[in-house]
Image (cartoon, rainbow, N blue to C red):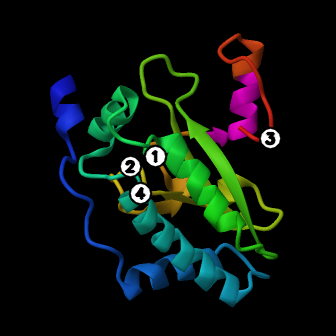
Amino acid sequence: MLLGLLLAGCGAPPPSSTPDDVARLEQAILALGPGIDPEEAARAARVSYEATARLAVAYEIEDGPLVHNMKVNAGTKPRGLCRHWAEDMEKALNAEGFRTLEIHRGIAHARNPILLEHSTSIISRRGDSMYDGIVVDPWREGGHLTWIATREDRRYPWEPRLAVLKWKQETGRTKRVSRAD
């Protein structure tokens, strides 16, 4: 069973996005609520897809996410763990200087000793909770952007990253907590 999970999703990342893909994400961002600048929604959607494609090349993605993780951990691939994707997506989106959108980081399964911990970036309307946002996750399909409303993501029970890091520090599962993590 473990071998089947590891091999699931093997192969090169799917082809890059289409204009319709970007437009659907743009519309989903606009639907987060009033006050979102349409230009910012369009830019956030475009940057999410462009960053995913750029990072898939930089990370040398050739396999499904779990196989790629093994290669990163073995030192044969440069980056590509979910936290790398989350960090780099967050940087790309924050570099846009959005006024009406906010970028959050979420972590799922950190408290579950059986399931693998997973990290991602989340886009919300400025001032809203990450739970009112949209998960932008290029890791889960190995270099192909998956996006979904945070509350609709049944696969991952997202928690705010800083809350998880604080819990890890309090329980001795990590050494430090900082905004830079």
Nearer the observer: mark 4 or 3; the answer is: 4
Percent of width and height locating residue 129: 75, 55
Decide: is 121 above or below 46: above
- The answer to whether mark 4 and mark 3 are in CB contact below 8 A is no
Apparent side of residue 92 relative to residue 140 in the rendered image (left or right): right
For mark 4, what is the residue? 58
Q: Whole-Å distance between the Cαs marked 1 and 2?
A: 13 Å
**Badge 4 amino acid:** Ala
Along the polypeptide, which appears first: circle 1 or circle 2? 2
Q: Secondary structure at mark 2?
A: loop
Front-lying residue, 46 or 78: 78
**Badge 2 amino acid:** Arg
Q: Whole-Å distance between the Cαs marked 2 and 3?
A: 25 Å
For mark 3, what is the residue? 179
Query: On residue 140, which mark appears?
Result: 2
Q: Whole-Å distance between the Cαs marked 4 and 1?
A: 30 Å
Structural crowding at the residue carrying mark 3, measured as other residues with C-alpha within 10 Å and reported as few (<14), some (14–19) or many (≥20): few
For mark 1, what is the residue? 154
Q: Secondary structure at mark 1?
A: loop
Q: Secondary structure at mark 4?
A: helix
**Badge 3 amino acid:** Arg
Along the polypeptide, which appears first: circle 1 or circle 3? 1
Nearer the observer: mark 4 or 2; the answer is: 4
Q: Main secondary structure of the magenta part?
A: helix
Q: Secondary structure at mark 3?
A: loop
Along the polypeptide, which appears first: circle 4 or circle 3? 4
Where are the magenta residues, as a range?
A: 158-167
Q: Whole-Å distance between the Cαs marked 1 and 3?
A: 27 Å
Percent of width and height locating residue 170: 77, 15
Percent of width and height locating residue 109: 52, 30
